[in-house]
Image (cartoon, rainbow, N blue to C red):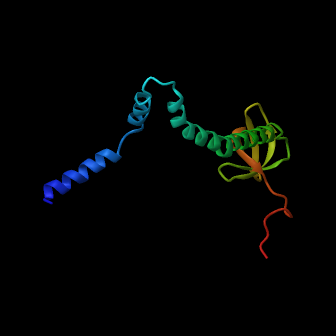
């Protein structure tokens, strides 16, 4: 077989195997031959089933977890009060000295106070006995 013939055969095989999904959907619709849409539905059924399984196993649990974490964070930030020891998202440790609508004033050192947004408060400082201890 000549080089041209072998490269032409390889190109035709590649072109044959690289059909797009839209071509396959169009082919399924045309091959119906006047019958009901049953064969098209059977063709799409595996894709619908895979999407359903992925939705209930991956997407929905992630959405629920994200909502739960957002609700806990919102409740934490609303419950801030004077004297709470907190850590900001920038890594600054401080003690809450005053709470306003959208801001919190933190004492980070003697006679040093900073005002940060409530959304910048990431968490409470762990108690001395609750931290991760290495043995």
The image quadrant that residue 46 belongs to is top right
Does residue 37 appear left or right of residue 108 in this picture? left
Does residue 121 appear left or right of residue 83 in this picture? left
Between residue 37 and residue 115, name the one nearer to us. 37
Residue 42 rendering spot, x and y as whole percentages = 54, 35
Position of 20 relative to 38 (above/below): below
Residue 123 rendering spot, x and y as whole percentages = 76, 49
Tell me if I can see residue 117 in this picture: no
Residue drawn at x 62%, y 44% is 54
Residue drawn at x 80%, y 63% is 131
Between residue 12 and residue 57, name the one nearer to us. 12
Between residue 91 and residue 41, name the one nearer to us. 41
In what quadrant of the picture does the N terminus appear? bottom left
Does residue 5 appear left or right of residue 70 in this picture? left
In what quadrant of the picture does the C terminus appear? bottom right
Residue 118 rendering spot, x and y as whole percentages = 73, 39
Please state the total of marks drawn on the protein image.
0
Residue 68 rendering spot, x and y as whole percentages = 76, 41
Residue drawn at x 83%, y 39% is 79
Residue drawn at x 40%, y 28% is 30
Q: Residue at the bottom extreme?
A: 135
The image quadrant that residue 2 belongs to is bottom left
Tell me if I can see residue 91 in this picture: yes
């Amino acid at each position: 077989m000549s080089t041209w013939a072998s490269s032409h055969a390889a190109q035709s095989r590649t072109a044959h195997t690289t059909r797009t999904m839209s071509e396959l959907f169009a082919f399924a619709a045309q091959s119906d031959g006047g019958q009901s849409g049953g064969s098209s539905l059977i063709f799409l059924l595996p894709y619908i089933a895979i999407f359903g399984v992925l939705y209930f196993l991956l997407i929905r649990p992630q959405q629920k977890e994200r909502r739960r974490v957002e609700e806990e964070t919102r409740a934490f930030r609303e419950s801030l009060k004077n004297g709470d020891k907190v850590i900001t998202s920038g890594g600054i440790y401080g003690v809450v000295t005053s709470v306003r609508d959208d801001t919190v004033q933190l004492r980070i050192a003697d006679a040093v106070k900073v005002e940060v947004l409530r959304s910048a408060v990431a968490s409470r400082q762990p108690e001395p006995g609750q931290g991760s201890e290495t043995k």
